[in-house]
Amino acid sequence: MARIGMARIGMAKTDMAKIDRRALLAGLAAASLPRAAQAEADYPNRFVSLIVPFGPGGASDFVARIIQPKLTEKLGQQIVILNRPGAAGNIGMTDAARAEPDGYTLFLGNVGNVAINPSVYGKLLRISPERDLTPITLLADAPDVLIANSAFAPSSVKEMVDYVKAHPGEVNYGSPGAGSLNRLEMEVFRDDAGLKMTHVAYKGGAGEAAAAVVGGEVPVMFSTMSSAISFIRANQLKALAVTSAERARALPDVPTMVESGYANMVASSWQGMFVPSKTPEPIVAKLYATLIEVMADKDVETRLFNGGVDVRTSKSPQDAKAYIDGELQRWTAVVKTAGITAQ
């Protein structure tokens, strides 16, 4: 009987310990709620990092440097730009995806790293932008332009098609990388026009590749307008066509690829702001509202326009996600058809 009684007492103590532990955990959880809510209400109360997955001088860095002062002003805390180049934007994107989801790490993503890299790199990409990043809004749209060396004989899309067909396999084209948007644009164009050309990839982004066209290393390529527009305005490059649905405001005399007979050739190097997934919704909402104000600023719009970039924002974070999901599907299909893999 004594043994039974002692056993019951032992069980009772164990049960009480479990109850006490549960109560303690419940109390801690309850106590943490006000602190979490307070942290969201106080956001931001220190500097915010903005990861740019490319080096200085490219389209992404160009956009980041223009919006940084106004975003700092609106949020009341310093926005610190961190250039994390490498692996076609994958290094910076991975760093952003693995950051704490507290709103203190922003990521300036674009069509290349968010919508194209997942299918090009496959399992080599250790994160999934679709799963690990939350879109806040699109920010800017940089139409691409088909550029040619000033000494290249063709001066229009039709003349280029005729020339390349007369010299099959002899004409090289450049790009910022094997799986870059500019490479994929040329793949779509070559397929539609039936052209045989040789690809030459450059490291360092669209700026370096555009400089290679200026120098005559390759005669043609699709480039972000922001990387090529200064060369075009200085008559160091010829602009054959733009990839926007309508003529670009920065180059109103240059026809679109659609006008030139290629209806599939509507594309752009869009830029968008992201945070790590699981970032609290109130912080996402605050960032969205703030970014919309920043992009509506006339000085921001003018400076972007002068660099060949148009302001383009989303109706909501959900609207941004829907658009980006569509871009992911579109470019995944192109990558698969062209058989492009990471090199």
Image (spheres, rainbow, N blue to C red):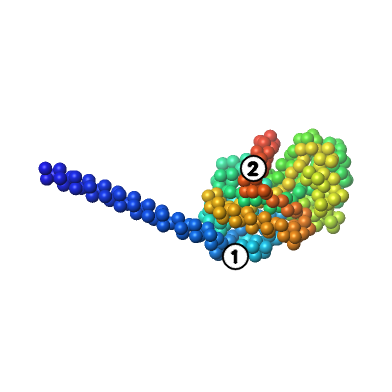
Residue 136 seen from this side: yes
Measure the C-alpha gap from mark 1 to mark 2.
30 Å
Q: Residues within 10 Å of mark 2 (few under 14, many from 20)?
A: few
Given the image, on which type of amino acid does mark 1 rest?
Answer: Gln
Query: SS of the residue at dot 1?
Result: loop
Mark 1 or 2, nearer chain start? 1
Residue at horizontal 50 percent and vertical 60 percent from the top: 38
Residue 61 % position (x, y): 68, 57
Residue for badge 1: 77
Residue for badge 2: 322
Given the image, on which type of amino acid does mark 2 rest?
Answer: Ala
Quarter the N terminus occupies:
top left
Q: Nearer the viewer, residue 33 or 10?
A: 33
For residue 108, what is the image quadrant? bottom right
Residue at horizontal 30 percent and vertical 49 percent from the top: 19
- The answer to whether 284 appears left or right of 24 in the picture is right
